[in-house]
Amino acid sequence: MAHKLPEFRYGDTSNIKPHKADAKLLERLHSRVNFKPPGPETDRIAYLKRRLLEEFDSNRNVKLAVETCVHCGACLTVCPTHITTGDIKNSPVGRAELIRAIIKGEKPSGKIFGKAVNALRKFDENYLEMLYTYYWQCLLCRKCATYCPFGVDQATLTRTVRSILYEIGMASRFVVTTIDNMERTGNNMALTPAAIKNILDFVIKEIKEEKGVEIKVKVDQPAYALLLPSSADFFMNIETLKGHLLFTHAIGIDYTVSTKALEVANFGYFLDPRHLRYIGEIYVNAARELGVKLAVFCECGHGWHAFKNYVVPRLREYGIEGVHIFHLVVDAIKDGKIKLNPEANGDIVYMYQDPDYYARGGDLTEEPRFIMNHVVKKWIDPEYSRGKTWCCGGQGGMLADEMLPLAIQYSRLWYEDAIRHGAQWVVRPCSICKAQLSHVVPHLNKMYGKDLKYSGLMDLVYRALVI
């Protein structure tokens, strides 16, 4: 029997939180990263405070978030979670105040919470539950850092708090399950090697029917390059997968896919840095095992951020380079290695919307725009672009079904931006963005009486490629 979704209440979103992972599931994750959690007799509030103080002393970003924030409110005007919910605790400054109170050993500031401060006097299990609620409503989109006059990145604080909550057994069941799938099977969808090969055979046949070309894909075989698509591309985003496969065929690169590393999303980023690194090593080990010289990362925002900043330096220790597939597409266009026909994507008005972590920490903003100029006839680059982009609303673990009422509200910002500009099709080249849009666009189209469509960017490359 399906659970009834919580109702969205403007001004108070305390009733919406992700279901928690059970002890057995958490135990599996703990064992992989050699973490021994505190015992059941541990005072969880005391443990939380001790760990927060440790992070405050050693983590510069945490200290900045707690000490430098002057409550100016600049983040409140741009934070998608606060703009759409009106709940001060669901904001960068509100979340920071909840932690500052514990670190400083005082009740939260009445200047921030007003009359609500009376309900926050005690640091007890209810307070712990509130931390879990609001720190898992954060999108980790880092827009607050873009606008903060002091450069305070509250997303760093969110990740730190989530990590400590994870240590005491409080973590999103959806995120923990996804991490467990990746660490056990090499992909978030828990696809078996046989399923991966069967889907590839199906997609290869479709490409032959549609493009008249027969392509071959190496699987778990040595090659020059390792292609890293999203496991979601094998189910929900087949057109994106076709784009990856046809493009790599067109440029003649010798590549392989690994059934041990068939995923771009790194949900460790949302939960705990130990799991981010664990998942990162899955890519590194697969690349080394197959003897590749290049790892090609496909469409995912936060995954690219983790890959670029952790995995690529690790790969270079073994003489392997890492690039995004967009880098290869841009080079192929400039070098005349591929021919593109924008007419193939019709007279549709497209809008390109930057995934958070391409624009904020991924250094991947101009390449997709260059590609858009060559694959479609007309597209819009909105004012809320690059560092100002609106999050899709699905980052940070918001894809959990029970979070849908909140995810829909978060998504209204980018959706309204699209329809305001007359866009018919939104392009968001990120695995999580596309998953989020599959959840919320049907609801939003019904709410607004529109028929907005969406896809990744490699979908458009696929259609435009002339073979």
Image (cartoon, grey):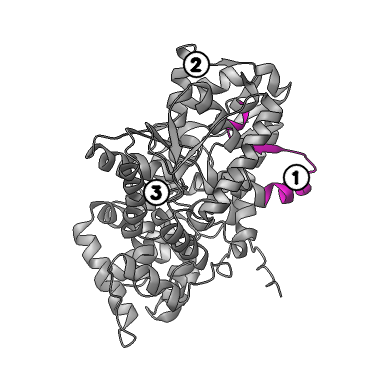
Of labels 2 and 1, earlier in sequence is 2
Q: Determine the residue located farthest toward the left in the rendered image.
A: 57
Please report the bounds of the magenta region as a residue range: 440-460
Q: Position of residue 207 (x, y in %)?
A: 65, 31
Disc 3 marks a residue whose amino acid type is Cys
Q: Which residue is mark 1?
A: 445
- Which of the labelled discs sits on residue 333, or is there none? 2
Q: Say if the magenta span includes residue 457.
A: yes
Disc 1 marks a residue whose amino acid type is Asn
Left or right relative to 306: residue 64: left
Of labels 3 and 1, earlier in sequence is 3
> Where does the N terminus fall, quadrant-wise?
bottom right
Taking the spot 70% from the left edge, 28% from the top edge, the residue there is 210
Taking the spot 43% from the left edge, 60% from the top edge, the residue there is 94
Alpha carbon distance from label 3 to label 1: 36 Å
Q: Determine the residue located farthest toward the bottom in the rendered image.
A: 41
Query: Quick one: 79 or 281, which is closer to the camera?
Result: 281
Which one is in front in this view, the residue at disc 3 or the one at disc 1?
1
> Where does the C terminus fall, quadrant-wise?
top right
Q: Which residue is mark 3?
A: 72
Of labels 2 and 3, earlier in sequence is 3
Q: Secondary structure at mark 2?
A: helix
Query: Quick one: 96 or 330, which is closer to the camera?
Result: 330
Q: Quadrant of residue 317?
A: top left
